[in-house]
């Protein structure tokens, strides 16, 4: 028997009014190196096991509808859930409809979940460094009818600031957009830095007008027991972050 499924509930002021959850690696059927709750088909896990893992998660969370899975490509493409179709390429999804489960997969990249104060609009963002630098947060926020001041953000599990070593190209990409980004980088030598993806995301959120920001205290690389990590293991599974507006 597999161990029980373990998920992380978004700890933010909207808890109880909107459903926002990230899975961990616990509670699935996949074998090493995908052990055990891998929900991604593209990582060469056994298709049947991934299907069973997805169904186990749907059942465990009592999801109102199946998640709207995206074919993520580190882009800045944002779609409305009403335009979703199987296999669609995008890295963020927005909806203002109840029971539409927005989903993004990660294993070091940053999942960002957004919801307005009245809990009538939500979005899920896959923010790798490239998408973050190129403006995927800003593009997603523009989908909302409510102003940024009325939007809350939760930052899910991602690579921590002590493990995310990057090159000068990554630093330059962020610095060219906003010089304040330099505060999220710690130089380790002439050509390498430790980057704080949480700090970089918070800078973008604050700049666009979002002040209510929660989460950001995890490290997928360091916490092997709970999280998949591509940076740590190379061949590995994926978690999923989900957000939806429950019907009353």
Image (cartoon, grey):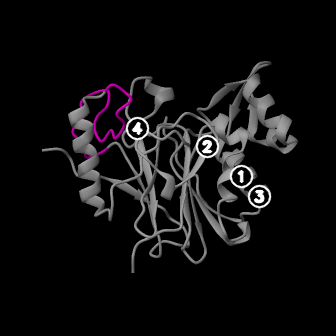
- Quadrant (top left, top right, bottom left, bottom right) of the C terminus: bottom left
Q: Please name the residue that numbered disc 1 is placed on.
A: 138
Residue 24 place in picture, x, y as percent: 37, 47
Q: Secondary structure at mark 1?
A: helix
Residue 144 place in picture, x, y as percent: 65, 64
Mark-to-mark CA distance, 2 and 3? 18 Å
- Closer to us: 217 or 125: 125
Mark-to-mark CA distance, 2 and 4? 20 Å
Which one is earlier in the sequence, the residue at label 1 or at label 4? 1
Asked if the residues shown at circle 3 and circle 1 are in contact, with their CB atoms under 8 angstroms apart, the answer is: yes
Residue 164 place in picture, x, y as percent: 61, 32
Q: Which mark is residue 208?
A: 3
Look at the image and give the residue range highlighted in magenta.
Answer: 26-44
| Disc 2: CA contacts within 10 A as few (<14), some (14-19) or many (>=20) | some
Q: Seen in the image, is 12 located left or right of residue 176?
A: left
Q: Please name the residue that numbered disc 4 is placed on.
A: 238
Q: Secondary structure at mark 2?
A: loop
């Amino acid at each position: 028997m597999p161990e029980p499924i373990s998920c992380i509930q978004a700890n933010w002021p909207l808890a109880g009014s909107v459903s926002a959850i990230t899975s961990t690696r616990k509670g699935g059927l996949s074998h090493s190196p995908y052990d055990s709750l891998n929900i991604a088909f593209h990582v060469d896990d056994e298709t049947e096991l991934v299907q069973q893992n997805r169904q186990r998660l749907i059942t465990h969370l009592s999801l109102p509808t199946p998640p709207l899975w995206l074919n993520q490509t580190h882009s800045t493409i944002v779609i409305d859930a009403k335009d979703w179709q199987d296999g669609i390429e995008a890295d963020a999804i927005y909806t203002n409809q109840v029971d539409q489960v927005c989903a993004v997969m990660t294993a070091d990249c940053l999942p960002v979940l957004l919801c307005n104060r009245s809990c009538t609009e939500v979005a899920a963002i896959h923010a790798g460094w490239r998408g973050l630098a190129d403006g995927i947060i800003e593009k997603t926020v523009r989908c909302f009818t409510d102003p940024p001041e009325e939007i809350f953000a939760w930052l899910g599990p991602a690579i921590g600031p002590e493990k995310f070593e990057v090159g000068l190209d990554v630093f330059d990409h962020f610095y060219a957009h906003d010089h304040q980004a330099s505060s999220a980088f710690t130089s380790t030598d002439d050509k390498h830095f430790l980057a704080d993806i949480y700090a970089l995301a918070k800078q973008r959120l604050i700049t666009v007008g979002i002040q209510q920001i929660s989460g950001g205290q995890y490290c997928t690389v360091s916490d092997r027991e709970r999280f998949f990590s591509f940076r740590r293991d190379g061949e590995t599974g994926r978690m999923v972050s989900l957000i939806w507006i429950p019907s009353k």
